[in-house]
Image (cartoon, rainbow, N blue to C red):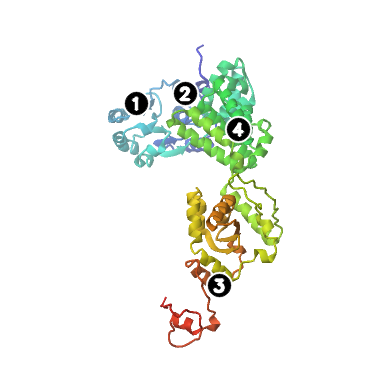
Amino acid sequence: MPYEVTATRKRPQDFESLIGQEFVVSTLENAIKEGKIAHAYLFSGPRGVGKTSSARLLAKALNCETGPTAHPCGKCDSCVNITKGSSVDVIEIDGASNNGVDAVRAIKEEVAFPPQSSRYKIYIIDEVHMLSISAFNALLKTIEEPPEYVIFIFATTEIQKVPQTIRSRCQQFHFQLISQENIVKCLKSAAEDLSIEADENALYWIAKEAAGSMRDSYTLFDQVAAFSEGHISLDKIREKLGLASTDAISSILRHCYLGEDKAAIEELNTLFLQGATENQIVKDFTSFIRTILFYKEGVRRKELLGFDESDLPQDLISLYTKDMLETMLRSFLDLYRDMRYSLSPRFELELLISRLSRIRFLSSPISIAEKLEEITKAVKSGKFEIERKEVSITASKDEKRSPSIIEEDKEDKRKPEESSITPRSEETEKKKEHPDLLKEISNAFKANGLSFEARQIETGVKNFTLEENNLTLIMSSPMAADMISKSRLKAEHIISRILGEETHLHIKKYEEEEKKYSEEVEYVRSFFKNTEVYELKEENIRHEHKPVRNDETVREFGEQDEGDEGGDF
């Protein structure tokens, strides 16, 4: 007896053996029992889920000698001929190769003749979406008002390509993907028929790879059975088909988390030496990371995981966070899409593995926001503490000086008279000696390669004080203060050269400075740096009916020099 592939041998011969299409089966059986037979049906859905098989079953049910019946006998001449594909009254047409107007014209001529030996003349047109627009238009009148003995059954995997005018004239049935559990049951039955021992995890792998298609699962089963020598196991499948094992993937991901680039790349090279391709490795990594992500989310159904819980490394699940897993999954999906146009897919994969060695430092915007919210709550409740540590800084040969730099936390502990800002009069005199001090410092910074620090001097200094050999800069933002602080040694060396004497640089944030002015006056002072600004209190201003010029009001209170000219704002 010649060999018959499993997909053909296990093709359903009655509605009861049609797996995973309960809605279609129940609807067709009820329609047949009640005698409500439509003149045109449209079966749509993914490949390998039973569309053509259902069309043949419907043809059997309508033309069975004991029918029409929902349970054809399968023994009469009509049922036997339909099963063999030799019935003269059941015509199967491939829409891909007969897609022109001429093929439709032949059908229109044939429908005028009644069936020879059966109750109905049934046309099964597979892949109907491949017909041309002209062919569809030629069919419209025929399928709308066919003879009472003619029934059309269309099957397609791309329902969107079938014109709406055709769909509106047919009863439509959408076939669903078949679940992994149902596929595994059918594969077990096929293995028993062939007297082959099959491990359950191997059958689940076949069902997962079939992606809901029964025909694909039977085809892959035949291939695996051919090299398994009577025992189908997952280890044999991985060895023969060049798949990445769970242990290998887990080991590479573990090395990536620990930052061990060399070990991860070497294990990846081992997979290549074992015969795994770049595409297959990316698929295996994607599937494994998806499983870990689902398991971390609490999913335990084997049908969704695709792995046994015992096969999942618990230590790896605890290492990676949800954000890390989502980022890795997206990276592998993007890599698979980009590999098609890559110069070297292997280089792309090795680059991604190298980048994953820094995955432990990943923080998503959401996690950062959550952490900031926790810190904010802790600060408000008074439970937030900052541990201060002393940092020793060693100056280079050119920058060595004495005494050593005093850290900011020590600086805050100095006596009030040492850290307080000089009185207004002394500070003004000191500034007059160096009216363009900030500009001189900025130019000197640029000349010595401190361009970023120079920019902060130009834009980030809110105010400054110069007393004896101490220069204090009041910075407008923490970022500006931190940038100047990082180059404090070199900055002090440059400032000392400008002032002609050893000068200590102190950095303060604006928030630490005692506010002497209102916010409105501070806004004005920001435009007039190094200039005295006097604030007029509201209670000192005379309220008169006539408008008062600013310069007159100032002179009246003795706050304006005689030579200055006022003006309206």
Element class at badge 2: helix
Q: Earlier in the sequence, mark 4 or mark 3?
A: 4
Residue 518: mark: 3
Left-right relation of 155 to 381:
left
- Mark 4 or 2: the one toward you: 4
Circles 4 and 3: CB distance less than 8 Å?
no
Q: Earlier in the sequence, mark 1 or mark 2?
A: 2
Q: CA distance from mark 4 to mark 3?
A: 66 Å
Q: Residues within 10 Å of mark 2 (few under 14, many from 20)?
A: many
Instruction: Using the rendered image of the protein, determine whether residue 42 is visible from the camera's viewpoint.
Output: yes
Element class at badge 4: loop
Q: Earlier in the sequence, mark 1 or mark 4?
A: 1
- Residue 304 lies, in percent from the top left, at 60, 36
Q: CA distance from mark 1 to mark 4?
A: 38 Å
Residue 306: mark: 4
Q: CA distance from mark 3 to mark 1?
A: 86 Å
Query: What residue does disc 2 label?
Result: 79
In front of the other: 63 or 490: 490
- Mark 4 or 3: the one toward you: 3
In front of the other: 92 or 325: 325
Q: Residues within 10 Å of mark 4 (few under 14, many from 20)?
A: many
Left-right relation of 414 to 364:
right
Instruction: Using the rendered image of the protein, determine whether residue 150 is visible from the camera's viewpoint.
Output: no
Query: What residue does disc 1 label?
Result: 97
